[in-house]
Amino acid sequence: MTTASASGYQSFTDEPEHVGLLRDTLKKFVTQKAPREKRREWDKAHQFPRDVFGQLAKLGICGLTIPEEHGGAGVDLVAAVAVIEELAQAGAFLAGPFIHAAFYGGANVVENGSEAQKAEMLPKLAAGEMFFAYGLSEPDVGGDLPSVTTKARMEGDEIVINGAKRWCTGADFADVIYCLVNSDPEGKKYKNLSVILVPTDTPGITLQPIEHANLRYTLSSDVYFDDVRVPASCVLGGAEKWNKGWGQLAGRTLDVEKIEITAVAFGLARAAVEEAWQYAQEREQFGRVISGHQAVRHALVDARTKLQACRHMLYHAVWLAQEGRPCSVETSMAKLFVGDTAVEIALTCQRVMGAYGLSDAYDMERNVRDILGMPIVGGSSNMQRNNIAARLGLPE
Ligand SMILES: Cc1cc2nc3c(=O)[nH]c(=O)nc-3n(C[C@H](O)[C@H](O)[C@H](O)COP(=O)(O)OP(=O)(O)OC[C@H]3O[C@@H](n4cnc5c(N)ncnc54)[C@H](O)[C@@H]3O)c2cc1C
């Protein structure tokens, strides 16, 4: 049995009933547990509410990327993306930690983990009691990830790591850093990389938080690795996956990663549209609500129309991924289109709210800050353009 989307819009197909019910539950949760005044406090404090997230996790949502035999709810990417969309109505304060458990942790370990890693980590990730942080970027490495310079070498049955990661979001609260390292300095590019699952409490790790304007649900930090020693079993997939990290990072995992950040951009853009739409019906100027002025009406309708296009791009890409169909082009297109269009939507909606779109009495200014980062994080818009051109065989 199916129902129309609980968000009130028709998508290209009806959503499964369980996704609609999940949306209803999350809408209530967000309204009750993450009201606007709390969101403002969390933004200023640069942190998410651990207690509220603990209550949220009890709904079982972190298991939506994890098979039942490992303590999850069964892999249901459409539902997991709907969760991100609904949680993003409260900014990144709940959507962020959900992603650190269900996607950075769950989806990656399901796809590439060894049996021992799956047995140890997946039940905790499904329960929302374990979090991963991404240690990919470095001071001199952004989009060109295969050029990372953080080094790892095997010494007996131990790995020794030295180097620095940048922008490692959540290294302050996560249990594990999913760390991309150069594991063979003499090796060929792409064949010299490993992913190491580094416990954050390992001696030799230090953090230096970076002050930044967006995604303030936690800290993003420089992470320094100074002779950090972990067992060889910490290689993602086990020691036999040494120097096979690029395949792990760039395969299906990357498709799912693109979808997850696209869902954040879409959810935040929806929040911006809904806030401006409501505001325009309440604010009066020149003797009428501003939604009665044609220029404002048109701006709002344009924003909603673009949002609908984003919805189709996102959910089509998720559906392909859930069906196990090839979707590298579609996920890149969705990341590119939704990331860039979300910025247009947010700026339009902010303007509708005049001065109040810049005041912290509303969510708009925070949503704009967060959305501005969406074409950059998780593979910039230009990197998506490069991926699409290469995948479609466009000669250089
Ligand atoms: C709040 C925040 C949180 C973040 N969290 C994390 C995290 O948890 N883990 C993590 O690893 N990273 C994280 N990042 C880093 C993020 O993933 C990078 O910013 C992103 O990958 C882009 O890298 P860069 O900013 O160094 O840009 P660069 O790679 O230096 O690119 C700069 C500009 O040049 C363009 N460009 C570069 N190369 C090309 C090319 N070949 N063709 C065309 N254009 C090109 C880019 O599109 C961009 O516009 C975070 C960043 C922010 C702001």
Image (cartoon, grey):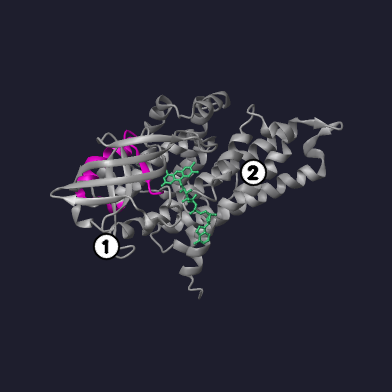
Please state if 158 lies on the left or on the right of 264 as rendered: left
Name the amino acid, label 2. Ala
> To which residue does mark 2 refer?
346
Q: Can residue 348 be seen in the rendering of this structure?
A: yes
Residue occupying the point 52% across, 37% down: 212
Q: From this viewpoint, which residue is outermost toward the right?
A: 286
Name the amino acid, label 1. Glu
Q: Position of residue 85 (x, y in %)?
A: 51, 42
The total of numbered circles placed on residues is: 2
Looking at the rendering, the stretch of residues picked out in magenta corresponds to 111-137
Q: Residue 164 appears in which quarter of the rendering?
A: top left
- Residue contact between numbered discs 2 and 1, judged by CB atoms under 8 Å: no
Q: Is mark 1 within 8 Å of ligand 1?
A: no
**What numbered label is drawn on residue 186?**
1
* Mark 2 or 1, nearer chain start: 1
- Count neighbours of disc 1 (C-alpha within 10 A) and say few if under 14, some if 14 to 19, many if 20 or more: few
Residue occupying the point 38% across, 57% down: 147
Q: Can residue 7 be seen in the rendering of this structure?
A: no
Q: From this viewpoint, which residue is outermost toward the left?
A: 156
Q: Is residue 304 magenta?
A: no
Residues under labels 2 and 1: Cα distance?
46 Å
Residue occupying the point 34% across, 63% down: 189
Give the mark toward the camera: 2 or 1: 1
